[in-house]
Amino acid sequence: MPAYLKPGWLPASLLVLVVLFFWRPELATLGAGVALFMMGMHHLEDGFRAFTGGALERWLGKSTNRLWKSLLFGVVSTALVQSSSLVTLLSIAFLSAGLISLVAGIGIVFGSNLGTTTGAWLIALVGLKIDLATVAMPMLVLGVIMARRTEPFWRGVGQVLLGIGLLFLGIDLMKEGFEAFEGVLDLSEYHLSGWLGVLAYTLLGLLATVLMQSSHATLMITLAALASGQLAYANALAMAIGANLGTTVTALIGALGSNNAGRRLAGAHILFNLITGAVALLILPSLTRLVDWLAELLHIAADAWTLKLALFHSLFNVLGLLLMLPLIPLMVRLLMRWLPDPQPVSGPQIEPVVLSEQPRTRAIYLNESSLLHADAALKVLSQELRHMAALSRQVVAAALYLPPGLQQGMSRELLHRHLQVAVPADQREDADSLYERHIKGVYADVVDFISHMDLSLLPEQQQALMDHNLAARDLVEAVKAAKHLQGNLRRQVDSDQPALREAYLGLREQAGQALLDMLRISDVEGDHEARSALLAEFHSQQQRFANEFQQQVQLRLRNRELDGWQATSLLNDLHYLLAVRENLLQAHMALYDGARLPLPPESDKDAEGGGSAGRREKIEPVVGV
């Protein structure tokens, strides 16, 4: 929360406003206009989100694969929603989620600066010359009625109508507020000339934009004050420059909750506005003369100050594009160097890695800025769950004393040879501490992120969110099952009884093969035919191993190589192994194929009895020492 809205300042600020409103009702009218304008912008933003969410990723892919397309996308989207701040924040969210490239994001942000000029032209041409309140009334009525519908499309249309109606009503009240000042207070007496006036009103425009978090609102106030004669033309030009500079604060705030990818785009936006603003201030007299010349060329009257301000605002942003477009390649290289991407945690490396000595792992892809849009939020959630899947495979491998390098695609023959060698004592890690150190923190971040996804989701987005949520739970369940399995494995991996030692060796080898199978799922992502063949192979292999393992346990029990206590514990650990495999398979199918597997009939029966075989708690005591 900004410092000026913290609890200590808020009551005092409200009290001052109330006193001012009673002292000067004209201020209350002006303040109500600003409030309605900002409320209208929020409704307009929500409306466009409501009926563009499902197709947005596809539109982005088609609209931002070239720089000129990105620029056009930024211009059009800002003209529609009348908020360059929203477009900037959404672009940061899309870039942080990997939906667009940095060059595309820069193009959108640069285009959005030009798109802000459309609002100034619209108000200067017609908004200050007609009764906008009359136009707003039917829009407000229709908007309220349609916004109450449950269908996302019609609710979105209603929000848009409601937003436009509030925008028009707010502009009309701002115009009335400034006109009322003529008989009470002449603000034009505070006109400042020279560079003192330029700097003072640039700062005023910057502060107004920071306070209202909207350069559009600042421009509307400037236009209304200029039209009523309360603001001098030269001071209005400086305020327009300050309004553009103020949007850098919005980008900075959005970058704080983003990852380095989003921060790079915020940095590009800040550089654009700072450089453009500095150049415009330096050549302001020349720009003013150019505006006068163009106004005469376009048959704009010499005293049509609002139209000339709109022309200046457009010229100012076109100047920024001309200055910065050639610098984009250099800007991208510098930003990539200053803000590099973090390296995600991968599987075990070829050299032994003691996981318990590594720093605690937390989410690396989740960020607050992606919560602005459902597509961006789901994208970063998918990336984070793939990161969590790699961590889960890593922890399962360490918990079951599997060899380093397993996740680099080790062959089954090499896996078998590695498992014949005794596990060094310094590589036997505790599964409980691994879970606490590398899984629990990431899972907590995922759960917290999902709880903040209060966006309106389309049915397919709701299904994707549910699948992601279940995938996260499956990964945790797989690690917990490996924790249970380690309880006996720790005691019996070096057992003097050949039958017991070989049984646990077989369980470890099957766990290693399961981890290798998970990598094969990611290799055939999107190939449904290959996926079906893999699933059939996995199911057959799992059934064959389970049957053979149980038969071996029964045989060794009859041959007195195992006692009943040890046999039942081995069967119990078989269930844990199958739980590891089943939960990993469910999670990887959801993450790499976009669909969970249907539960097999035997799992349904188990569920009726209180839980699947893979998720039940221990049913037998552990193997005795």
Image (tube, helix red, strand yellow):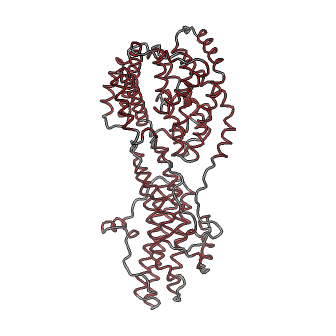
Q: Is residue 403 left or right of residue 456?
A: right
Question: Residue at the location (56% across, 25% down)?
Answer: 200
419 vs 459: above or below: below
Residue positioned 52% across, 84% down in the render: 501
Q: Give whichever of 551, 564 is nearer the camera.
A: 564
Residue 74 place in picture, x, y as percent: 54, 31
Task: Tell me if residue 20 comes above or below residue 392 in the rendering.
Answer: above
Q: Position of residue 373 (x, y in %)?
A: 46, 41
Residue lying furthest bottom: 560
Q: Is residue 82 above or below residue 537?
A: above
- Count of all numbered marks drawn on residues in the image: 0
Quarter of the figure that contains the N terminus:
top left
Quadrant of residue 126 within the rendered picture = top left
Q: Nearer the viewer, residue 576 or 254?
A: 254
Q: Indicate the position of residue 598 as horizontal and vertical percent values.
A: 40, 59
Residue 69 image offset from top left, x and y in percent: 59, 32
For this rendering, which residue is in front, 381 or 434? 434
**Residue at the spot x=39%, y=68% of the render?**
615
Which quarter of the figure has residue 600? bottom left
Q: Is residue 226 left or right of residue 11?
A: right
